[in-house]
Amino acid sequence: MAARPGFSLATGIVLLVLLLLSVVLSATMGYMNVPARDVLQVVFSFFTGAGTNLDPVTVAVVADVRLPRILSAVLVGGVLAVCGTIFQAILLNPLADPYTLGISSGAAFGASLVIVLQVFGLALPSAFSVPLFAFGGSVATLFAVLALAAGDRRLSSTSLILSGVIVAAILSAAIGFLKFLADEQVGIIIFWLMGSLSGVSWQDIFMLTPVAFAGLVVCLLYGRELNIMATGERAAATLGVNTVRLRWILLVTCSFMTALCVSVSGIIGFVGLIVPHLLRHLIGPDNRWLIGLSFLGGGLLLLFADTLTRAVLPSEVPIGVLTALIGGPFFCVIFKKRQQDGSAGL
Amino acid sequence: MDRQDSDILWQLDQVGFGYGEQPVLSDLDLELEKGQCYGVLGPNGSGKTTLLDLLCSLLVPTTGTVDLCSQPLSGWQPRQLARKVALVPQDFVVRFGFSVREVVEMGRHPHLGRFAVLTEQDHALVDSVMEEMEVAAFADRPVTRLSGGEKQRVAVARALAQDPEVLLLDEATSNLDIFHSLSILGTIRNRVHEQGLTVIAALHDLNLAGFFCDQLIFLKQGKLLHQGTVDEVLQAEVIREVYGVDARVRQDEFSGCSQVSYRVPVSR
């Protein structure tokens, strides 16, 4: 559509401005109110290394507590939304999300394993072994799913989805067993499964940022090919798209990105499903725009949810619960509207 | 016949294809020439689509060799092949609400570098093929909302936007009304005559084949039964042998080409 690129660009700029404003606004909010001017001063001094004449407590709260958490919300939300876009495009399925191939179950299994081992007295430092095991669990799951699906040389979306469902089903049974073993410690597992950004540090940001941007670049490189995939595998292949290679590259890239996010934040659902849908509704299905805008949109949504639970609600609600509670009704409205337009599910 | 080797596009030598033990095509020897319009005919499951898939490297033969322009097909880069050969698939399903124009523009993909955007010439070509296939009127509508026939026209437009030397049509007119099927096949036929386009079309309608094609290839149970010009092979005996149907073929003055009529009851 002739009007689309201009509108997409405008949407992108609006999202970017909103995101930057939200970052600053969110940093002012919390137990202690910090004026926006002071937040900007802290950020400025962080980059330039110049000193500030602010109260050191204010600086510490903004720089060491709030900013890492805010940035992690943006990064995790952005990555999940981008991966959702890619998974939906690659699996030709609007119901797909970053967890469709069982990444979340693998991570949950890894994390539960650590918690159960601790119950049995194996002293693992949970600060880094939970994320490590979660990451290992998701990567192992990814390879199990791909190995199972690769028997089909075309790596069709049906094979991939089915393999994901099979592996995830086995893993959820295993997680159930671990919960049973954990006995009274089961609360820790459940809380981790619902996701939280309360424990993030600058180290997490330094790890997530390069991965998020490298992954984003890889995804953007294949935007046009992803569009062509929407017209079917055979049709895409006759246009010179190597569909199998495209699937491998993007599935592995996005799964690694998702696994890293999950290891930092636990399982945060719905962002990866809803953001691509909302944006597709708004700017159309062109992946070349959708990928970048998903990052901004996902970052914005998760930052909103995290700020709500951190600074507005009387006590911290698990963020995975909040994203679904905020996103769900919104999603229902869109879905209803599209049903009336006669294009439900597309 | 004085024929140059360079006029030969495909050379199939003892080609066979099967899923597991089940052969779909076997012992196929075939030469396909430039600037001709071939019709691939045969009953359901005779291997027509498989043959087209083998020609554009969607499938790899289990036995035998397929050469395109004297080079093994397996040696062709996918994008290089896509600049030469375009396929219009039988079922053109588009997920997500891409507009007609966006889908037709995808046809330029094999000609574009990774970061290239469409040039003015690309846009002009896209516009002209959309006019030709009569889809320009709804260029901004999502393809998901089109009728089956409109979708097929979009698929042909996209294949023509590829600017190919060869067009493979897999039942590409099965959903079209009489007017559109004649006008679109007529347009493609003009391209064969005027621009030297080569067409290989899997067809069901023998009358359409008589109107549209220069050469016919009859397949049955994965074997090549007859190949030749329309006059040579569009014969009652051939139709009985291939389809098991009683038919009469006559030269029709009104349409100016061979027409087939059938008679019930059908004898086997």
Image (spheres, coloured by chain):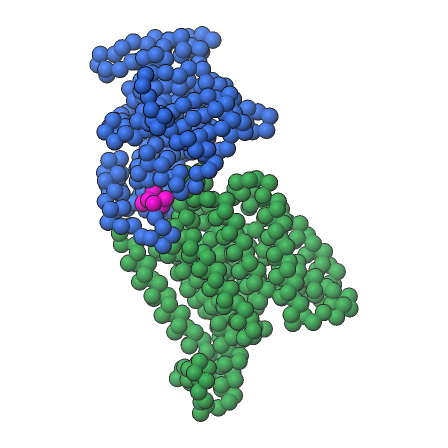
Chain colours: A green, B blue
Horizontal side of residue B55 vs A203, given as left or right: left
**Residue A321 in sight here:** no
Horizontal side of residue B76 vs B189, given as left or right: right
In the image, is residue B212 part of the stretch drawn in magenta? no
In this figure, what is the number of numbered marks?
0
Q: Residue furthest left?
A: B254
**Residue toward you, B236 or A117:** B236
> Is A32 rendered above or below residue A7?
below
Q: Residue at position x 30%, y 13% from top?
A: B259
Q: Residue at position x 49%, y 73% from top?
A: A70
Q: Quadrant of residue B86?
A: top left
Q: Quadrant of residue A240?
A: top left
> Is B155 rendered above or below residue A202?
above
> Is A161 rendered above or below residue A333?
above
Q: Residue at position x 45%, y 66% from top?
A: A299
Q: Residue at position x 34%, y 32% from top?
A: B166
Task: Please provide percent x and percent y for residue A318.
Answer: 56, 67
**Residue toward you, A303 or A128:** A128
Write the start and end of the magenta stretch as one range: B105-111
**Residue toward you, A302 or A249:** A249
Horizontal side of residue A225 vs A104, given as left or right: left
**Residue A258 in sight here:** yes
**Residue toward you, B34 or A322:** B34
Task: Please provide percent x and percent y for residue B53.
Answer: 45, 31
Q: Mostly what secondary structure, the magenta segment?
A: helix
Task: Please provide percent x and percent y for residue A307.
Answer: 48, 72
> Is A324 rendered above or below residue B78?
below
Task: Please provide percent x and percent y for residue A91.
Answer: 49, 47
